[in-house]
Amino acid sequence: MIPYGRQSISEADIDAVVAVLRSPWLTQGPAVPAFEAALAQSCQAQHAIAVSSATAALHLACLALDLGPGDWLWTSPNTFLASANCARYCGANVDFVDIDLATGNLCVAALAQKLEQAEALGRLPKIVVPVAFAGQPCDMAGIRQLADRYGFAIIEDAAHALGSTYRDRPTGCGDWADISVLSFHPVKIITTGEGGALLTPHRHLAERLGLLRSHGVVREPLSILDDGPWCYEMQELGYHYRLTDIQAALGISQLQRLPGFVARRQALAARYQHELADTGLALPVVSEHSQSAWHLYVVGWPEHHPISRRTALEALRADGIQAHVHYIPVHLQPYYRQFGFGPGLFPNAETHYQRALTLPLHPALTDDEQTRIISRLKTLLGTTHSKETA
Ligand SMILES: *Cc1c(COP(=O)(O)O)cnc(C)c1O
């Protein structure tokens, strides 16, 4: 099976991990701070905090921004569950803003309109989480303008977008978002097995995030329990969301390969764009100010085609090509329906979901494999007779 996404592990990656296994530190040693420094440099961020997953990072970001019961967090319905769940971990309410059908990203005009209504109702969000869908950054300047006007914080879910740029600045640089979150799950741009990171321009947030990822424990300055060199204090409720040195060593090695990964992803995406033009598929639209690292390549299946998106996906899979669908809109999940969400509320996200077909794209995908995917897809698109009943 050609997977829709997967890691690329080199001998250098393996050597880096083995070196940690032979060292005195498996966790909380030198590799984590070294990985954080490398991430900050790569993304031109002031501060980088490595954690156990992007989900943990989103949770900590909400905590550091004091999200709690009675507060609202808004995000895109076209995302992985974690972009919304982080608010629920804090007891806060979730709402969604519909997407631009062309990019799959949160629609800034829809956000502006919803903010206007929310202001009138006294129900403005404390946090908005734009998601860089498939790797393409959102209209961050537009969202920043609204954040300044309405007073919400921006957590950019950049789980897909390490290595992307917006207005010639790397994702995570902190020019627009208060916090950007990365994921190092194996299907993402680089991997640490499991892992994530937070990037922020704000020192106070970086310090708070550093405490919250490790039980909220400080060693200095101590306020009450200052009895000797063994002492530590828990000053607020934190979690155990640390990354290990084993993972961080893999991350450092993978990060050195980031330019090559992004170049390969961009080349594969460019070939799809070229060869699938004029086939009837709705191809991904890249905005003027963005360069995508292409975590995903998602096309829209033609609406009135004789074979359905599902039939096409199943035919591809039967042929060893793991096509996929990104994303089931979060507001349609059973868990979220208890809050009154359901079909029809975010029509663009629902339409996007109906049509979406994710084609394999990862650095280890070979030219021959891509040729096979394109040719199989063109055959399916050329199919005029369906075995399906109408
Ligand atoms: C993968 C992903 C996450 C969660 O990442 P983990 O590291 O698996 O916790 C969050 N948001 C988006 C958009 C993702 O794709």
Image (cartoon, helix red, strand yellow):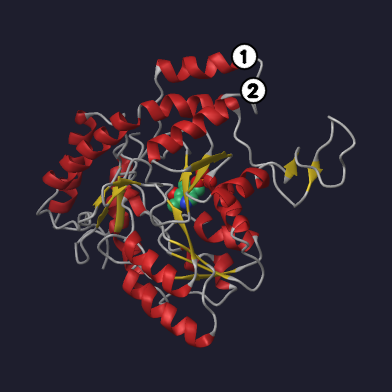
Please say if 224 is above or below 15. Answer: below
Specify whether residue 343 is in view: yes
Seen at 47% across and 29% down, the residue is 251
Q: Name the residue at the left extreme.
A: 278
**In-front residue for pair 138/47:** 47
Residue corresponding to mark 2:
26
Image quadrant for the C terminus? bottom left
Seen at 54% across and 84% down, the residue is 122
**In-front residue for pair 135/310:** 135
Name the element at disc 1. Answer: loop
Q: Position of residue 217 (x, y in %)?
A: 75, 42
| For the residues bearing labels 1 and 2, Cβ distance under 8 angstroms | yes
**In-front residue for pair 143/333:** 143
Q: Which label is found at residue 378?
A: none
Report the amino acid beneath label 2.
Leu
Seen at 59% across and 39% down, the residue is 52
**In-front residue for pair 248/146:** 146
Q: Which label is found at residue 23?
A: 1
| Count of numbered circles on the image | 2
